[in-house]
Amino acid sequence: MRLKGKTAIVTGGASGFGKGIVTAFLREGAQVMIADINGAAAAALAAELGDRALAQTVDVSRRDSVNEMAAAALRAFGHLDILVNNAGVTHLPTPLEEVSEEEFDRVFNVNMKSVYLTAQALVPHMKDRGRGAILNVASTAGVSPRPRLNWYNASKGWMITATRTMAVELAPAGVRVNAINPVAGETPLLKSFMGEDTPEMRAKFLSTIPLGRFSTPEDMGHAALYLCSDEASMVTGVCMEVDGGRCI
């Protein structure tokens, strides 16, 4: 029960890596808001996981929606200990000069602007309490980029830098900020990363991962649990690869 008495928001929490993080946090005693643009999926998961789970529909790229999420969490929980910025999107594998402006804006707003918006909504609360943990779900794409995912790679590199600079600035206030860098995993985004989900394309991706498998939601849940728990009270500004050795 490493998170007993703790409260958390997990954006993009209804599926994929977010669902793995939500499940781990609940198992370890936290109250968790499952915040997702798919409100029906969030509600179904909350109903499945029990009365310590709360569903919230959110579009993390919009200030009004993020502020509504933050207010709902504080009304329900009274305070917030943990914020996980997990919601993310990608564009399909495409030469960098051919990615449409609409696709670029979507990647920018969901992967990058959302971190700014959630910080504006919730960092003042954490500063007032003198404690808190923020976890950004970045990617190995921000460390060792793959071709034809250029603007997605760049957005995750931005998130890694944002994590480090947030950690430095917020440390005196007692707020820790870390990130995890997953490799491609068994999530709804996998097909988008690969362009097509075929045995040949999977084999090509797996050949770049020394441990020989994709990451799983459970892998992300275990890593997030450590970084957001009091066991990591001396850990801030870390961007942890959870990648089976891909970035070595």
Image (tube, helix red, strand yellow):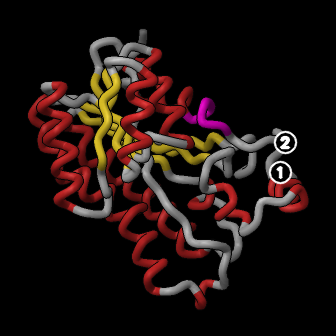
Do the CB atoms of the residues marked 1 and 2 lie less than 8 Å apart?
yes
Task: Read off the residue under disc 2.
Answer: 212
In this view, the residue in front, 56 or 121, is 56
Q: Residue at the location (44% across, 32% down)?
A: 45
Question: How far from the left and from the top, in percent, is residue 174?
Answer: 22, 32
In the rendered image, residue 36 lying in the magenta stretch gets the answer no
Bin the neighbour count of mark 2 within 10 Å (Cα to Cα): few under 14, some 14-19, many 20 and up: some
Please state if 150 lies on the left or on the right of 200 as rendered: left
**Depicted 146 relative to depicted 45: above or below:** below
Question: How far from the left and from the top, in percent, is residue 242?
Answer: 63, 40
Task: Read off the residue under disc 1.
Answer: 206
Q: Secondary structure at mark 1?
A: helix
Question: Residue 222 occupies which quadrant of the picture?
Answer: top right
- Which stretch did the figure color magenta? 216-220
Bin the neighbour count of mark 1 within 10 Å (Cα to Cα): few under 14, some 14-19, many 20 and up: some
Disc assigned to residue 13 = none
